[in-house]
Amino acid sequence: MDGLSVSAGGAADLKLLLAHRLNMFKEMYPEIAHDIDAQSDMTESWLKSKLNEGVLVPFVARLGGNIAGSACLLIREDQPRPGSSLIEHPYLMSMYVERDSRQRGIATEITIAAIAWSREHGYDRIILHASSAGRGVYEKLGFRQSNEMKLLL
């Protein structure tokens, strides 16, 4: 896309990453927007600590020089499993595209950048949880649905 760039972010993008993560959740769950806002300080502290630990890799998209979206890879530890010799894997999270930049392929380009980064760093898979709005983006890039269950305690 003309005028679109995706680059690795860093600690200087903390406020942007926080705003995008909170906005992502508010759009998915508007009925609990107050609860999402109430976790802002905790979320900011968590993001900052993960950036400082070097396990959170942000990607920031700009369209015509303006912020268009962002996402992060969280490098997380997992248990050994057949088909992989690695314990860690990237988890794509907090994908958010600004409202006025949607339907322009920005989430796709951010995801492509995250895939490239993961390959360059020797990872053999990326995991994510897709919203219904984002599922098509990931499926067209080769992501496949896996099975997970949850029990809220």
Image: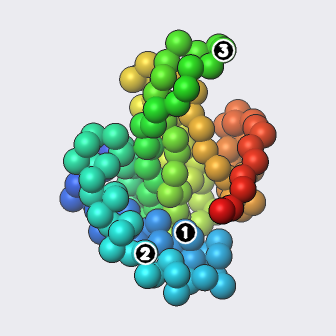
- The amino acid type of the residue labelled 2 equals Gln
Colour pattern of the rendering: rainbow
Give the residue displayed 50% in from the left and 77% down from the top: 36
- The amino acid type of the residue labelled 3 equals Pro
Residue 3 placed where, x, y %?
A: 42, 55
Give the residue displayed 56% in from the left and 34% down from the top: 126
Mark 3: few, some, or many residues within 10 Å (few <14, many ≥20)? few
Give the residue displayed 34% in from the left and 57% down from the top: 47
Q: Which residue is mark 2?
A: 39
Q: Is residue 119 above or below residue 85?
A: below
- The amino acid type of the residue labelled 1 equals Met
Report how far apart the C-alphas of labels 3 and 2 lie in the structure.
Answer: 37 Å
Residue 2 placed where, x, y %?
A: 48, 52
Report how far apart the C-alphas of labels 3 and 1 lie in the structure.
Answer: 33 Å
Q: Secondary structure at mark 2?
A: loop
Residue 129 placed where, x, y %?
A: 64, 50
Residue 37 placed where, x, y %?
A: 45, 81
Please give the label number shown on residue 36.
Answer: none
Q: Which residue is mark 3?
A: 82
In primary-sequence order, the first of circles 3 and 2 is 2
Q: Which residue is mark 1?
A: 24
In primary-sequence order, the first of circles 1 and 2 is 1
Q: Is residue 10 visible?
A: no
Mark 2: few, some, or many residues within 10 Å (few <14, many ≥20)? few
Mark 1: few, some, or many residues within 10 Å (few <14, many ≥20)? some
Q: Secondary structure at mark 1?
A: helix
Which picture quadrant has residue 147? top right
Report how far apart the C-alphas of labels 1 and 2 lie in the structure.
Answer: 14 Å
